[in-house]
Image: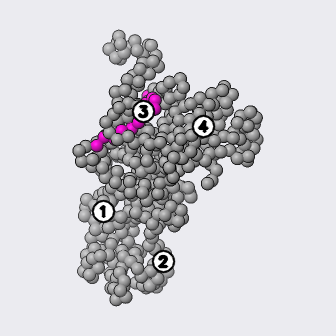
């Protein structure tokens, strides 16, 4: 496993050095990782990157080369660098199972550990969970819009370099994509791979029909033909010829792909041409800068499309450049901790998330309660690491995907729509009591006076 210990913000190391100098490095502290708020129109989030985050935490260590580099910076004392030589994570991690749909402002993951150990995890855990959660959630929205249509990840060429392409393909699969065009991701993660052809292939032959025939000769088992290089309608007619030739060989044409123009209206014409040639089984796949909004509109207008290749807008979560995942101190040996900054208020203490369902097993909302506070619902946060050691092997990616798809289907319908109503979590009475007490404790006396004696001004 690649050592990513120095893939962190400098201030994690400077804080650790200060903790070490002041004798606080071994104080036990608890941090929550959560997403502050939803992007516009999003109704829920898919927790992804959890397994990778656990792997990072349980394998963290400083190599001799890492420590040599830090010494060369002239920032750190030898005593602190000596402390790093034997550094490892000894704490506990509790998290929702990867693939779980979660609400904003609700813990996806909780770390309890000696303060310096918990502190160092912040940057890499956020880097891992934020990106994969964003892509899995975006993909889930696209998959919801597509309905029964198969969604394939076409994002490799538009991803921000290798890591984003690989982890993005993984997250997209968790979110419900059926396959990826990324061959390396297929090999690494066992994701089904899928692809068609480029326009350059068509243009490499004297005619479109000859190009189709050459491809079908090479891949006679359910090939997909790209039909828009010159004209979609003529392309569909040429595809129909290939379809009949394949039938004579005991094979079948799998699909045709549309990549330009008014995809909805073109799909209707193409469907008619295929059906008239007794090729009703041939699927129509659409691509071309698709997203959940465009797919939703196509479906509402009666597009005859069976599958969608989605690239740029899924692998980058466009227009959402990033989600607001944070990692906040909620408790230490001195007691509960809270942040009261406007728009960034946090819930203190060790907590549990309880999922409440109706009589049919469909989710209605979550309750955020203190860890040992009785509550209705099913607890979501589960122990994953104890004393720095994994409690369970990595879950199979296929199992994570199936669990996620099944869980999303239990969310309220309005939460799954393209312009969604947000899924919520509500604080328990016990948690709210502590929030109120800490808010009062840290609120300036002048503000309390104004609220009490000036009508809440």
Taking depth in this image into account, of 67 and 385 the one nearest to the observer is 385
Q: Please count the marks in the image.
A: 4
**Disc 2 versus disc 1: nearer the observer:** 1
Earlier-in-chain disc, 4 versus 2: 4
Task: Name the element at disc 3.
Answer: loop
Q: Which image quadrant: the C terminus?
A: top left
Q: Residue at x 34, y 36 (%)?
A: 367
Task: Name the element at disc 1.
Answer: loop
Q: Is residue 234 above or below residue 415?
A: below
C-alpha span from label 1 to label 4: 46 Å
Q: Residue at x 43, y 59 (%)?
A: 398
- Where residue 17 sits, quadrant-wise, is top right
Residue position marked by numbered label 1 in the rendering: 148
Taking depth in this image into account, of 238 and 35 the one nearest to the observer is 35
**Disc 3 versus disc 1: nearer the observer:** 3
**Disc 4 versus disc 3: nearer the observer:** 3
Residue position marked by numbered label 3 in the rendering: 371
Q: Residue at x 40, y 48 (%)?
A: 100
User: Is 355 one of the magenta-colored residues?
Assistant: yes
The residue most toward the left is 359
**Dot 4 and dot 3 residues touching (CB under 8 Å):** no
Q: Is residue 211 above or below residue 175?
A: below
**Is residue 144 visible in the rendered structure shown here?**
yes
Residue position marked by numbered label 2 in the rendering: 201
State the mark number for residue 117.
4
Over which residues does the magenta segment extend?
Answer: 342-357
Q: Residue at x 45, y 66 (%)?
A: 192
Earlier-in-chain disc, 1 versus 4: 4
């Amino acid at each position: 496993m690649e050592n990513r210990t120095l893939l962190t913000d400098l201030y994690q190391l400077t804080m650790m050095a200060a903790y070490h100098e002041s004798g606080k490095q071994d104080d036990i502290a608890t941090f929550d990782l959560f997403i502050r708020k939803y992007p516009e129109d999003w109704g829920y989030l898919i927790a992804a990157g959890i397994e990778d985050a656990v792997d990072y935490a349980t394998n963290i260590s400083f190599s001799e080369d890492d420590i040599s580099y830090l010494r060369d910076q002239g920032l750190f004392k030898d005593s602190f660098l000596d402390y790093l030589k034997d550094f490892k994570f000894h704490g506990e991690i509790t998290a929702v199972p990867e693939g779980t749909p979660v609400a904003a402002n609700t813990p996806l993951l909780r770390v309890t550990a000696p303060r310096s150990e918990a502190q160092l995890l912040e940057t890499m855990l956020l880097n891992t969970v934020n990106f994969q959660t964003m892509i899995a959630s975006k993909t889930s929205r696209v998959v919801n819009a597509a309905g029964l249509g198969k969604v394939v990840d076409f994002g490799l060429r538009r991803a921000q370099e290798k890591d984003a392409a690989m982890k993005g393909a993984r997250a997209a699969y968790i979110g419900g994509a059926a396959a990826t065009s990324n061959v390396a991701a297929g090999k690494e993660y066992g994701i089904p791979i899928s692809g068609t052809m480029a326009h350059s292939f068509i243009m490499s032959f004297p005619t479109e029909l000859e190009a189709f025939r050459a491809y079908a000769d090479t891949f006679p088992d359910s090939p997909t033909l790209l039909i828009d290089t010159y004209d979609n309608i003529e392309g569909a007619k040429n595809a129909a010829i290939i379809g009949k030739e394949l039938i004579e060989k005991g094979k079948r044409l799998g699909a045709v792909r549309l990549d330009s123009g008014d995809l909805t209206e073109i799909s209707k014409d193409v469907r008619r041409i295929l059906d008239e040639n007794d090729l009703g089984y041939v699927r129509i796949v659409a691509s071309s800068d698709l997203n959940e909004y465009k797919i939703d509109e196509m479906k509402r207008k009666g597009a005859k499309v069976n599958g969608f290749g989605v690239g740029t807008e899924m692998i980058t979560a466009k227009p959402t450049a990033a989600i607001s995942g944070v990692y906040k101190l909620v408790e230490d040996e001195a007691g509960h901790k809270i942040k009261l900054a406007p728009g960034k208020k946090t819930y203190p203490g060790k907590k549990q998330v309880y999922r409440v369902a109706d009589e049919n097993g469909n989710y209605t909302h979550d309750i955020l309660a203190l860890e040992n506070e009785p509550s209705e619902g099913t607890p979501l946060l589960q122990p994953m690491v104890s004393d720095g050691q994994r409690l369970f092997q990595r879950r199979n990616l296929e199992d994570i995907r199936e669990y996620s798809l099944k869980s999303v289907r239990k969310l309220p319908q309005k939460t799954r729509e393209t312009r969604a109503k947000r899924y919520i979590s509500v604080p328990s009475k016990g948690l709210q009591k502590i929030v109120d007490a800490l808010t009062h404790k840290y609120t300036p006396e002048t503000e309390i006076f104004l609220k009490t004696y000036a009508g809440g001004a």
